[in-house]
Amino acid sequence: MRAAIVLLAALVVACAGPKESVVLLPSPSGQDTAVSVTQGSRQVLLNQPYAAARVSRAALDAYPSSAQEVQGRFGTALAAQPLPPAQFTLFFVDGKDELTDESKQIVDGVFAEIARRPVPDVFVIGHTDTVGNDVANDALSRQRAEVVRNAFVARGLAVDKVVTIGRGKRELAVPTADGIAEPRNRRVEILVR
Amino acid sequence: MTRRYPHRLAGLLVALAAAWIAVPAWADVGQIKVAKGRVTVDRKGQELPGEVGMLLEAADVLRTGADGSVGITMRDNSLLSAGPNSILSLERFEFDPTTSQGRFDAQLRRGTLAVVSGRIAKKTPQAMTVRTPSAVLGVRGTEFVVSVDE
């Protein structure tokens, strides 16, 4: 008798199953977005803002959702979303680890983006143009990254929140032949999360 | 004692692989950036408090209480945030920051989840999925929400 009750309960659970829903949100950048929802052999493609699907073990149905429904149901989850990662590029004087005058003026703005995060992690990736050999450019790209890190640390960022990487002339922003002094390649890329 | 050796070997291999692609040896796949109310992380049979700043590993399972919510940023810039009474499993995460190649599979077992996909899904549209108990969501460069009610 006991075994039969357990089996019945298991059957009820299997029949009811969880009810699930998926809603595609508008893309902030306006780019094409889509989510495919696949359940067994059935599939629905959500590719319009607020296109939605309801799923259970037995069914998959598309329906139109709305901003109001999303806010009511997912408001707390959406409110917990971390700040989106921010990216910046700073440029350097030819052959040196000194920022250009224009880039010096941006450092405070980048730091403000770091400072608004409770637990920032920051990547600073240094690059050079194609003038000079690999050894010199690897060293220079690292120095450039460290100069930027030091600027953030001087403004109050804990040094263990920053990772610096030097890529030398391996990842050019503007492809050039070897030996070309290209200002747009003399840069550090900064990722703030 | 014998059980510890494979573990150390795996750690060493991960460190060597990471050094080889010239990137620091992170074991972590993401970080808790936002936490409110009760948040815990199941890791290798242990229940850890889920606090802001905590580094996450593949196979971690995040749980939120009735008053809880949590937001995480993954290494590929994906953003995942879960509302109250949620169970979110970071089943698999592999990411090469140089090429953006990788694989990210998460599972929402219960509750609500908001997702902003990152570099993995942007680079390879089939490389990120979010599973629910009944369905598999294929992510193609997207912001969306998912709920699982019991």
Image (spheres, coloured by chain):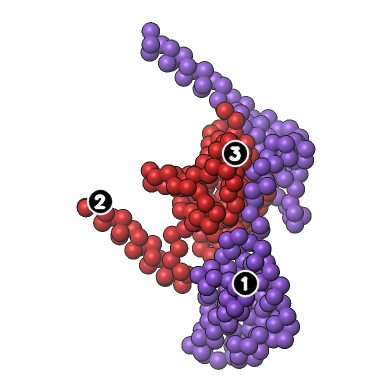
Chain colours: A purple, B red
| Residue B135 in view of the camera | no
Residue sitting at x 51%, y 86% = A139
Marks 3 and 2, Cα distance to the nearest angstrom?
39 Å
Task: Report the residue marked by disc 3.
Answer: B67
Whole-percent x, y for residue B66 in the image: 58, 36
| SS class, disc 2 | loop
Q: Which mark is residue B3?
A: 2
Does dot 3 land on a helix, a strand or a loop?
loop
Question: What chain letter is assigned to the residue under label 2?
Answer: B
What is the three-letter code of the residue carrying label 3?
Asp
Tell me the SS state at disc 1.
strand
Pointer 1: residues within 10 angstroms few (<14), some, or many (20+)?
many
The structure residue drawn at horizontal position 63% and vertical position 84%, both measured from the top left corner, is: A186
Q: Are marks 3 and 1 on the same chain?
A: no
Amino acid marked by disc 1: Ile
Query: Above or below — where is B19 with respect to A178?
Result: above
Q: Judge the density around disc 3: few (<14), some (14-19), many (≥20) Cα neighbours within 10 Å.
A: few
**Of the pair A100 and B97, the residue shown nearer to us:** A100
Give the residue drawn at x 50%, y 55%. B54
Q: Position of residue A188 (x, y in %)?
A: 62, 78
* Residue A190 image label: 1
- Distance between the Cα atoms at labels 3 and 1? 36 Å
Q: Of tags 3 and 2, which is closer to the observer?
A: 3
